[in-house]
Amino acid sequence: MRRGVISVLVMALMFLGACGSGEKETQSESSESESSKASVSQVWETDRTELITPECATYHPEMDVFFVSNLNRDNDTENDGYISIVNADGSIQNARLTEGLASPLGNDYHDGFLYVSDNGQIVQIDIESGEIINQIPLEGASDLNGIDIADDGTIYVADSDGNKIYRVNPDGSSELIREGEDLNEPNGVLIKGNELVIASMGSNSLLSLNLETDELSTLVDGGLGRADGIIPLDGGQYLISSWTGEVYFVNSDMEVQTLISTSADEINAADIAYIPEKNLLVVPTFYDNRLVAYELSY
């Protein structure tokens, strides 16, 4: 009789022990899953006096500054867009490096020059003086937007309204390399070897164009809002902004996590910048007239 009772108690304790072990394992897996997600915390923000309708910020590591394209839509004056230089701590170094632009959107730098998408042309600016030294018209383009420049100086730029991708070669010649509804309002572009990663506003997706075969494929199918800026991260991961006010973290499995959402406050998130050494994400807020910086953990 006693042996039977003891046996039952032992079995019950073993059962409870097994249940407890299983619960701890589940909690550990849950914690691991949570820790693998990205998070942000705000570090600084600019005031609303000097950056007017900022659309794009690009970080220049050697200068440790951001170049900011300002559409300046607080008035109806034509050709009133300008470029600002903002320090990495959020202070304004030069609010008006270059003025007289029509509709400055994407910008990128190469070999001492800043290149800015401005309606149907790319404007070349001397970074030291701020002087416009060249204007590169692209035939058939009307709404040039996101831009990226390869190490050899080759420029890739998206025409959002025209569903086109252009290339400007180092010798100054230009060509239309892709056109079609499948681009669905291309915005941000990113060069990765023989691949051009494209943020598609119309399809809320992330696309990939093989520059050798012209094959267009989908990396992330939907869920990216009005996809705008693209930042590459280690391990094949990305940050993607949505003009409507979101920033997404895309992991190596192309799973999407919402990092920032300010759309309920009617605050946009345009073409973003990033400092890898500081894990610092910088978001131009467009009509909210600020840059907002966040420390990223992932």
Image: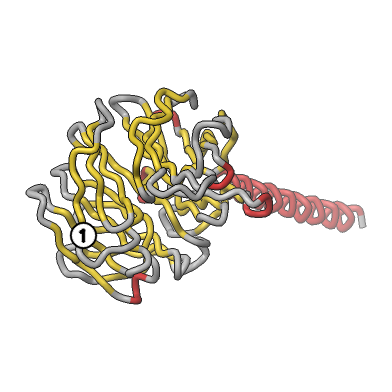
For the N terminus, give its image quadrant: bottom right
Crowding at dot 1, Cα within 10 Å, few <14 / some 14-19 / many 20+, comes out as many
Query: Looking at the picture, how far across and down is residue 25, in whole percent?
Result: 64, 49
The answer to which of 96 and 113 lies nearer the viewer is: 96
Q: In this image, 2 relative to 97: left or right?
A: right
Write the residue at 52% across / 64% down.
223
Query: Looking at the picture, how far across and down is residue 13, in whole percent?
Result: 80, 50
The amino acid at mark 1 is Leu
The answer to which of 163 and 251 lies nearer the viewer is: 163
The answer to which of 266 and 256 lies nearer the viewer is: 266
Query: Looking at the picture, how far across and down is residue 241, in whole percent?
Result: 48, 52
User: Which type of secondary structure does the marked residue at label 1 adopt?
Assistant: loop
Q: In this image, 26 relative to 180: left or right?
A: right
Q: Residue furthest right?
A: 1
Write the residue at 49% across / 27% down.
90
The answer to which of 253 and 224 lies nearer the viewer is: 224
Q: Residue furthest left?
A: 171
Q: Is residue 65 placed above or below 195 in the rendered structure? A: above
Q: Residue furthest bottom?
A: 181
Query: Looking at the picture, how far across and down is residue 162, in whole percent?
Result: 32, 69
Read off the residue under disc 1. Answer: 138
Q: Is residue 208 placed above or below 168 in the rendered structure? A: below
- Picture quarter containing residue 257? bottom right
Write the residue at 26% across / 58% down.
196
- Picture quarter containing residue 174? bottom left
